[in-house]
Amino acid sequence: MVTEVLQLIIYGVIYGSIVALGAVGVSLTFGVLRFANFAHGDLMTFGAYMVLAAYVGFALPMWLSVIVALAMTASLAVLIDQTLFRRFRRANPMILLISSFGVGLMVRSLVQIIWGGSTQVYDPGIQFPYQFWGLRIRPDHLIILGGTLVLVVVLHLFLQKTRMGKAMRAMADNPDLARISGINTDRVIIWTWIMGASLAAAAGYFLALDSRLQPDMGWFILLPVFAAAILGGIGKPYGAIAGGFIIGITEELSTLILSPAYKPAVAFALMVAILIFRPTGIFKGAR
Amino acid sequence: MSVLRMDSVYGGYGGADILCGVSLEIGPGEIIAVIGPNGAGKSTAMKAVFGLAKVRQGSIHFMDKNITGLAADRVVQQGISYVPQVDNVFPSLSVEENLDMGAFLRKDDFSAQKRKIYELFPPLAERRTQSAGTLSGGQRQMVAMGRALMLDPKLLLLDEPTAGLSPRYMDQIFAIVRDINSLGISIMMVEQNARQALGLAHRGYVLATGANRFSDTGANLLANEEVARMFLGG
């Protein structure tokens, strides 16, 4: 029993890493731009497929393929922002939300047109898991855990130590004051997309490593990603990371008493409960 | 040459005019107090200078340069800084980071400016790493003023800097306004605490229903019977 619970917690942390990286992006864009980006899951999908294109299509080494995918996904997000979302800066957030829904559809369809609808993998074949104390973990899982750790540290240093990172936090705090302080808010917005989309691409790559590539993979993980962002207090990137791990572990542990088919419902139930009882998230913030 | 000159400005926020012909002038090194009843357009006049309210007619010049209708982020580049009445700090950022954000436009080393501000506001020096949201009202006001001073502006706009503060902090803030002014920075201050503001200011303007009613030196306005009866509560 203890082994089983520990094994589920390991799976929860792995799944939670993916959800957390996605949720950080949602939280960053919400904090700075004040709208819930429904295309975020599809940015994850796009990132995963860009890795496939570089790794299988151009036969680049995996590490380079991931960097290329991060850069391409960030570019796509900035392109979408500058051509579409930019026109709606002063519009009702609902309009932005609906248009992001449309963007998500377009990205998803684009992926499907280029790579087809069937499932794919980076490396065919079976990976043998490492065994220790009766627990199992696949080499891919170690990549996910290590990669997430590196990205979270990079994000933390960016937000705390760089001028742009501080400006991003400032703009999430008080956009009007940011503007009258002379902060170049257009540049902050572009950097927000770069950071959010890069993390989304990494999350998409990890998601594909954990299971398979599918054009709707990002769309289906959007619910737990949003649940994690809300759990952590939307607009707060650190809360989103914690929220991701809470969602991941809770979903996995729920399989002890529920059918695994109900996993998404667990995330949804957590999100509804938080919205009812602590709408500002589980962490106390300044606001 | 005046630092700031508003010439019969009409405007507001898009609907009916709130400002109906406001004119005022600030000389180098001057403190100007703008007083008047609620809804007189005091804050709106200040926001018009900073590009946050629309100027429909009339003009605003800063150092003889026409800045009428310039957006806020451009006005700040000219050398004017603005401290709003509310929401004037970044609550989740530390005191130090708030000051850094004030210097966002600066590409040079601004550590000397930061030292100067910590000298001006000693309570902030002890709380550099504390987040601004956890500070008292008076200390927040200091952070807000410190942030606005990071660009070393020629003109500082203060929108009711003592609103909601305890009398102890009120006196402290007025004293700081004088200190800032002694650094050679001109100040335009909108105030509800009219007596103290006029006592501090070189000159004052009394606005009512969006237009100038009186303008004189601070001392003369305080001595003016009509002003005292109508706007200073007898």
Image: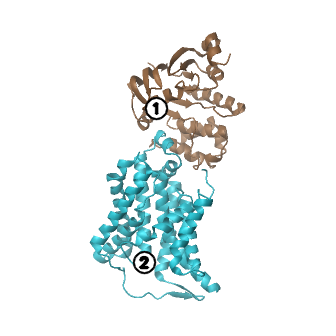
Chain colours: A cyan, B brown
Residue to which mark 2 is pinned: A209
Residue to which mark 1 is pinned: B50
Cβ–Cβ under 8 Å for marks 2 and 1: no
**Residue A104: x, y in percent?**
37, 63
Residue at point 55%, 70% (across, down): A247
The crowding category of the residue bearing disc 1, from other C-alpha atoms within 10 Å (few below 14, some 14 to 19, many at least 20), is many
Classify mark 2: helix, strand or loop: helix
Residues B11 and A128: in front is B11
Q: In this view, does A239 lie to the left or right of A36?
A: right
Residue at point 37%, 56% (across, down): A99
Please name the amino acid that badge 2 sits on: Leu
**Residue B234: x, y in percent?**
68, 15
As drawn, B107 above or below A262: above
In this view, the residue farthest toward the right is B168
How far is mark 2 from mark 1, CA to CA?
53 Å
Please name the amino acid that badge 1 sits on: Phe
The crowding category of the residue bearing disc 2, from other C-alpha atoms within 10 Å (few below 14, some 14 to 19, many at least 20), is some
Count of residue discs: 2
Residue at point 40%, 49% (across, down): A187
Classify mark 1: helix, strand or loop: loop
Chain letter, disc 2 residue? A
Residues B100 and A172: in front is A172
Residues B229 and B128: in front is B229
Specify whether residue B109 is in view: no
**Residue A204: x, y in percent?**
42, 70
Chain letter, disc 1 residue? B
Q: Is residue A115 left or right of residue B193?
A: left
Determine which of the numbered discs, if any, sits on residue A232 in the image: none
Q: In this view, does A265 lie to the left or right of A65?
A: right
